[in-house]
Amino acid sequence: MDKLGISILYVEDEDYIRNNMAKSLRRRVDTIYTACNGEEGYKIFKENRPDLVITDIRMPVMNGLEMINKIRKLRSSTKIIMLSAHSDTRSLLEAIEIGVNGYILKPFQTKRLFKLIDDLAQNIILDKKVQEQSVKINELYNALVKDLETAGSVQEYLLPDYLIIEQDLFFTSTYVPSSRIGGDLYDIIKISKSEYICYIGDISGHGVKAALLMTAVKTTINRVIEDEKLSEPYQILNRLSIILTRELFSGDYMTLLLCYVNCEKHYIRSLNAGHPPILIYNRETKAIKTHKTEGSIPVGWLPNYVYTPDEENKMDFNTNEVLFLYTDGLFECENDKGDELGIDGLKKFIKQKAKIHPAVVLPLMILNTLVENNYDISTDDFTLVAFSKIHDTESDEGLTFFSGNIKTELCLIKQQLLRFAGFKKLSEGLINGLESMSKEWFCGLLNLEMDVPDWEIRYLTELKETIDHGIEVTLWFMTPKSQQNPLKANLEKIPVIQSDRLDISVKSTSYTGFQELKINISEKQ
Amino acid sequence: MEIGHRFIGNILIINIFGELYSEQAMEMEYKLLDYSTKSNQVIINCEEMEYVDSKGLGVLIKIHNLLIERGGDMLVCAPSGKVLKVFELTRFDNLIKVFATQEEALKEFKS
């Protein structure tokens, strides 16, 4: 007869009974432990964690019930059989209360006990299998999560940084995949000194398949534009349609909005293949409108579909305009009351935030605002892109972009401040105060010690004149996605800045994707 | 999501009820492919359809392309709310004829 693959602890104070029973049990079960009282039994249980405990109730030192209570605290699922005399009804009631798995009255036939052990052994073995399986499932799940995280990092690497600054154009974006990986894609590709291709796409479906397709499609788009030198939107879409339907898509498709941007000649030619429309915000009039075009069908709907120049749209690209591209995950997100944001809701948020913040931080600002307003952005991939020409007078108005070594570049803010104060004809006292600052002043402000590595970091500064004719400096730091943000820790420990001539206050705020630092400088009264 | 079907003459009418997400898209594809073997002329009635996501839309396109290949056609009728919005955004009606009512779609097939 095969032995049962379980372990049993048998506790009995009478030596004769214990030894005989242990002998019988050894013939049927793999591992047997014995103990002569509750205390010894508990000690053995703690050390060996047997699957089943068979115990007498009345024993010296520690009785069976006390021992069972202690054992159940260690492992509540332990299976227990109690053996007791006929007269001990009180113990029987207590045992029922504890929830023992079997109760046998003495004297008993060994056959009955063995039948009970056999029944419980089946449960124990089944439980063990379930536990082993769940450990395996957990291991597989953790491995899968790790793989997805790696895939997510690869995807993020393929997508552009939060902010791309070219000589005459900036391209800023925010992207949150619904499940570590996503099917959204977007990019800016420079094709000549003042010509760019900006695009956004959304692969149908979700999960690993959409994510893998996204990676392949993105590479294909870049190859078609960079290697085959195609710049007409309809040509690019036709080439993509052929490659993707032949080699990649099987029942899949992609909505795509592709813009050819000519900054020198101030126009954009776009082709919208089933994608949500462009939103255009005018920084001068503070108005926002939807750019509705005829467009065409998504890539992959019809294998032999030919996109034509007639399906393209040509529009002026004015300096004051900021163009927003986005995917459906953005306007389909709902708040905690179940209200969908909608395109109109998105326009409202853009308008609201664009009045306060420069366009370059708007995608990240809007993401933060939606989260603050309890919109659930986790149900679909979330992408928002904004691009605009860089204003000729932007630096006079106080908005500048820096990219490079933070320690050396940041010290240039002093020059920028002086230029701005002169341009705005601010008071001599304030200008003198600014003059007296040492070059290291701003580095000190950020707590940048000499041993801090030379981070390559992108940041923006915006200078504004305040009501009391001081200056409000806002700095936004955007760390490249590939780097950790070492600034975060520094900005959270802002030192007190002292100046004889100036009143200075500093406030730091952390947002998803960037850090904001606001410094107010005014002349001491 | 539930799917019902019936015939009016030789024309197969398929009614889709509720929300159609990626998770049910395969089930719908299987059913639609099965139904569409019975007729080359199919009308998808979206009157009771509350939502369709990109995967669901892909299934409709697939069935349409299949019917066209077989010399038939697929028309869509009565979309509203979120479904209509998705159709408009994706230029669905550039590829598939969409009608306001089932009667109009039937008329199109009979003409």
Image: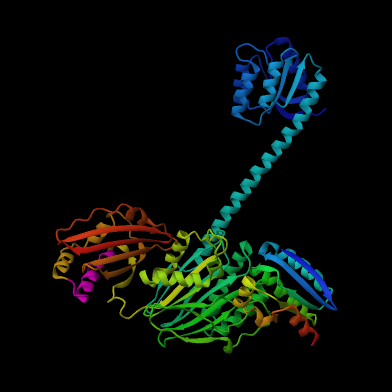
Residue A411 among magenta residues? yes
Q: Residue at x 77, y 72 (%)?
A: B14
**Which image quarter is the N terminus of chain A in?**
top right
Location of residue A147 in the rendering, given as x and y in whole percent from the top left corner: 58, 55
Which SS type dominates the magenta stretch?
helix
Q: What range of the chain is rendered magenta?
A: A408-426
- Is residue A376 visible to us here? yes
Location of residue A252 in the rendering, given as x and y in whole percent from the top left corner: 66, 71
Q: Nearer the viewer, residue A192 or A329?
A: A329
Residue A443 among magenta residues? no
* Figure quadrant of residue A96: top right
Q: Is residue A75 above or below residue A412?
A: above
Q: Nearer the viewer, residue B46 or B87?
A: B46
A28 sits to left or right of A350: right
Q: Is residue A63 above or below residue B52?
A: above
* Figure quadrant of residue A70: top right
Badge count: 0
Q: Is residue A154 above or below residue A493?
A: below
Q: Nearer the viewer, residue B78 or B89?
A: B78
Q: Nearer the viewer, residue A413 or A155?
A: A413
A192 sits to left or right of A55: left
- Is residue A9 visible to us here? no
**Which image quarter is the C terminus of chain A in?**
bottom left
Location of residue A50 in the rendering, given as x and y in whole percent from the top left corner: 66, 27
